[in-house]
């Protein structure tokens, strides 16, 4: 689920300046970069836990922004895997930098850990150009949201300008998740069995009372 609305428009850029055939030295990796990609490679599997690990690692590169991991192919839910994936405080606050990261980015890094660097460079583009994009969004479209995705075989950065902020929408989605968690914690089969047992016990006592009264009446 992506944020949209009347009078919204997107600006899109791409980054494809890294060739996977280059060596680490040609890419100018420093030790920190190499440790990051090594860590991603070690943890790179198809499991959702590893998706979250890589996502959190990427977000930690630019802690000044708020993030949500989403799955744009899932139009029914805002959060990836229907889990609260917010990182940072107060996502949607117009005074903050708010960025949606599509799970396609993380899955590509899982497939090829060298894409972590490309994802970081593209995310840096989103963060560094955020204020400029917000300024040029126009007075009639005051709300700006950044996006990072993997499309058309490359990392993509984009910004969406709308006349309505996404803060309320995010809060609604969080409440929906909380309601789902509550329903998951309720064992309806157990409750039904318990109520049936209580009803049986009650009817047994009623029956015993009737039989006892009949005996006393005789």
Image: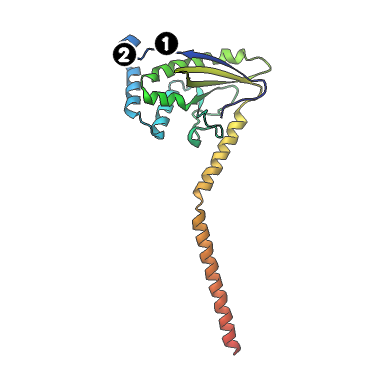
Quadrant position of the C terminus in the picture? bottom right
**Label 1: element kind:** loop
In front here: 136 or 15? 15
In front here: 62 or 155? 155
Quadrant position of the N terminus in the picture? top right
- In the rendered view, tell whether residue 167 sits above or below residue 200: above
Which residue does the image show at 57% across and 39% down from the upper left?
176
Read off the residue under disc 1.
17
- In the rendered view, tell whether residue 148 sits above or below residue 206: above
Which residue is outermost to the front?
Answer: 152
Read off the residue under disc 2.
24
Q: How many marks?
A: 2
**Label 2: element kind:** helix
Around disc 1, counting alpha carbons within 10 Å, would you say few (fewer than 14), some (14 to 19), or many (20 or more)?
few
- In the rendered view, tell whether residue 197 sits above or below residue 173: below
Residue 207 in picture, x, y percent from top left: 56, 77
Which residue does the image show at 49% across and 25% down from the upper left?
101
- In the rendered view, tell whether residue 64 sits above or below residue 207: above
Residue 141 in picture, x, y percent from top left: 66, 18
Circles 2 and 1, Cβ within 8 Å, touching? The answer is no
Residue 205 in picture, x, y percent from top left: 54, 74
Which residue does the image show at 39% across and 19% down from the upper left?
115
Horizontal placement of 92 versus 108: left or right? right
Which residue does the image show at 59% across and 21% down from the upper left?
95
Which residue is outermost to the top?
Answer: 26
Horizontal placement of 40 versus 153: left or right? left
- In whole angstroms, how far apart are the C-alphas of marks 2 and 1? 14 Å
Around disc 2, counting alpha carbons within 10 Å, would you say few (fewer than 14), some (14 to 19), or many (20 or more)?
few
Horizontal placement of 50 versus 135: left or right? left
Which residue is outermost to the right?
Answer: 140
In the rendered view, how is the structure colored?
Answer: rainbow
Q: Quadrant of residue 203?
A: bottom right
């Amino acid at each position: 689920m992506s944020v949209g609305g009347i009078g919204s428009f997107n600006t899109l850029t791409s980054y494809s300046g890294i060739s996977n055939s280059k060596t680490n030295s040609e890419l100018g990796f420093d030790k920190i970069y190499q440790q990051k990609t090594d860590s991603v490679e070690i943890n790179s599997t198809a499991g959702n836990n590893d998706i979250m690990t890589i996502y959190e690692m990427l977000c930690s590169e630019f802690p000044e922004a708020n993030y949500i991991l989403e799955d744009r192919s899932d139009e029914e839910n805002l959060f990836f895997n229907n889990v609260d994936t917010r990182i940072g405080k107060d996502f949607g606050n117009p005074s903050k930098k708010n960025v949606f990261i599509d799970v396609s980015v993380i899955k590509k890094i899982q497939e090829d850990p060298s894409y972590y660097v490309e994802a970081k460079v593209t995310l840096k583009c989103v963060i560094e150009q955020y204020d400029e994009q917000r300024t040029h969004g126009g007075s009639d479209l005051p709300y700006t949201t950044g996006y990072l995705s993997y499309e058309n075989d490359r990392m993509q950065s984009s910004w969406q300008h709308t006349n309505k902020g996404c803060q309320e929408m995010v809060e609604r989605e969080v409440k929906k998740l909380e309601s789902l968690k509550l329903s998951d914690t309720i064992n309806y089969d157990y409750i039904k069995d318990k109520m049936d047992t209580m009803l049986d016990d009650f009817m047994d006592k009623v029956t015993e009372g009737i039989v006892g009264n009949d005996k006393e009446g005789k």
